[in-house]
């Protein structure tokens, strides 16, 4: 058995691929035919075992919004580690409760009661449980191509076939097309009295950076109120200024009944929560706890994250840099064959890679991703056809780095 003190950050990709093949469950996959070994991060950059630098415009799937190795976040967390690293949520600790207080001020509307977990999946699962307790109903309606997690209930409300690996799906979960108000209306006319909740991402992430039509979410809010559904917004990818507002639902002036947050909340420290109103919170009174939920180190890091967002006005930064990146991607799409119209909001953007007939071209997207990596840029891919080039850079990205990204993509497409 290896001694942790003997581990080297420079084992190299080939050795790590050997270990992965021998010791991980086969479902664990990775990007790239020739993946680098990532050993260090700093600001908007990652570095591999050979010393090569990469501009990170995927941020561990929207996690590192404040940048890698941010001292304003890790230093308070280190101080907390040296004081109290862990105790369960059944004990009183100040960081968790201060974080709950802060989230109540940041969250929209009357959302002010938090339950902390260690992952976004758990937050969605908890939100669904809360909706069932509040309504006394069993069914849930979700969206095609949505992604909500990997526990059983969260996996079943996920509408992306790639991530729905449960061989015995829960029968009380049904899906409707994202952005299709008529389909949702028809569903609720039939199943509304049986349905506890509607769960959705305000803008779909893994589904392909899908933005619904104007007016869709206000109309959904009215339908949920009419049929007595709990509206759950999964803001795990879209939350914390990714789209230019604290939460993406605020662009439409819609407040959900329950909201799940994670990812960027910890900027690399594992923390998540579902947040609700006083009224709905009263439905959950039987004992509930989470061993790692509200961990004091993660809670201190999250408080530092929120402070950093406020001090550096990251919502405005996402709007400004997002506008620049969107314009640059539009220009490339006009000049280069095989790119569709860019879409998204703020610094949550995607560009379809298509073939000559305009159909999704996943294999070509993979080639572009590989060549971008070789050019020193780490981007992502999403969508049901895995053909949406996805850009989720740190919100601290600068104009010059946006230019570097666009130049690299321009050269790769040539």
Image: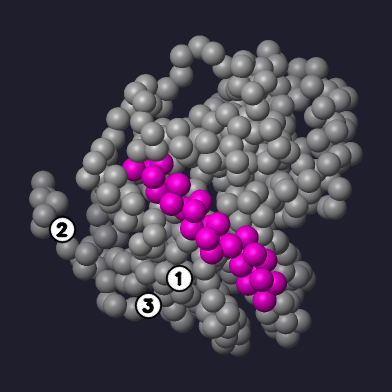
Q: Height in image: 54 above or below 78?
A: below
Pointer 1 residue:
44
Q: Position of residue 74 (x, y in %)?
A: 34, 56
- Going from N to C along the chain, the mark reached first, 2 or 3, is 2
> For residue 357, which quarter of the picture?
bottom right
First of labels 1, 2 by sequence position: 2
Local SS, label 1 = loop
The span shown in magenta is 297-324
Q: Is 352 colored magenta in this rendering?
A: no
Please determine whether, in this image, residue 109 is positioned above or below residue 244. Answer: above
Viewer-nearest of discs 3 and 1: 1
Q: Residue 60's x, y, as percent?
A: 46, 58
For the residues labelled 3 and 1, the Cα–Cα distance comes to 10 Å
Dividing the picture into quadrants, the one containing residue 187 is top right
Task: Check residue 7 in the rendering and tell me which mark sits there, or answer none.
Answer: 2
Circle on res. 53: 3
User: Callout 1: few (<14), some (14-19), or many (20+) C-alpha neighbours within 10 Å?
Assistant: many
Report helix, strand or loop for mark 2.
loop
326 sits to left or right of 298: right
């Amino acid at each position: 058995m290896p001694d942790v003190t003997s581990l080297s950050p420079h084992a190299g990709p080939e050795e790590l691929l050997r270990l992965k093949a021998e010791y991980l469950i086969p479902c664990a996959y990775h990007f790239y035919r020739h993946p680098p070994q990532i050993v260090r991060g700093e600001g908007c950059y990652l570095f591999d075992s050979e010393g090569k630098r990469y501009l990170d415009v995927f941020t561990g799937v929207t996690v590192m919004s404040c940048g890698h190795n941010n001292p304003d976040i890790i230093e308070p967390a280190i101080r907390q580690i040296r004081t109290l690293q862990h105790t369960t949520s059944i004990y009183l600790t100040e960081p968790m409760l201060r974080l709950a207080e802060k989230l109540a001020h940041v969250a929209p509307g009357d959302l002010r009661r938090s339950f902390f977990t260690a992952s976004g999946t758990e937050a969605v699962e908890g939100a669904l449980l809360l909706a069932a307790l509040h309504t006394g109903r069993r069914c849930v309606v979700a969206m095609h191509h949505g992604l909500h997690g990997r526990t059983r209930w969260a996996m079943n409300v996920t509408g992306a076939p790639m991530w729905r690996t449960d061989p015995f799906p829960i029968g009380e979960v049904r899906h409707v097309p994202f952005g299709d108000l008529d389909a949702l209306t028809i569903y609720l006319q039939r199943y509304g009295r049986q349905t506890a909740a509607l769960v959705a991402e305000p803008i779909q992430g893994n589904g392909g950076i899908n933005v619904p039509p104007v007016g869709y979410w206000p109309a959904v809010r009215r339908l949920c109120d009419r049929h007595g559904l709990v509206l759950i917004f999964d803001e795990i990818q879209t939350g914390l200024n990714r789209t230019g507002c604290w939460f993406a639902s605020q662009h439409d002036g819609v407040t959900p009944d329950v909201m799940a947050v994670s990812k960027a909340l910890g900027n690399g420290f594992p923390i998540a929560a579902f947040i609700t109103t006083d009224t709905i919170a009263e439905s959950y009174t039987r004992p509930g706890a989470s061993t790692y939920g509200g961990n004091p180190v993660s809670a201190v890091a999250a408080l530092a994250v929120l402070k950093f967002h406020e001090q550096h006005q990251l919502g405005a930064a996402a709007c400004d840099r997002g506008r620049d990146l969107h314009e640059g991607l539009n220009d490339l799409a006009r000049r280069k064959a095989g790119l569709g119209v860019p879409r998204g909001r703020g610094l949550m953007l995607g560009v379809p890679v298509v073939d000559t007939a305009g159909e999704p071209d996943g294999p070509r997207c993979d080639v572009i991703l590989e060549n971008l990596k070789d050019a020193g840029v780490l981007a992502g891919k999403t969508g049901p056809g895995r053909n949406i080039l996805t850009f989720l850079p740190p919100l601290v990205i600068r104009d010059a780095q946006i230019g570097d990204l666009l130049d690299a993509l321009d050269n790769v497409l040539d």
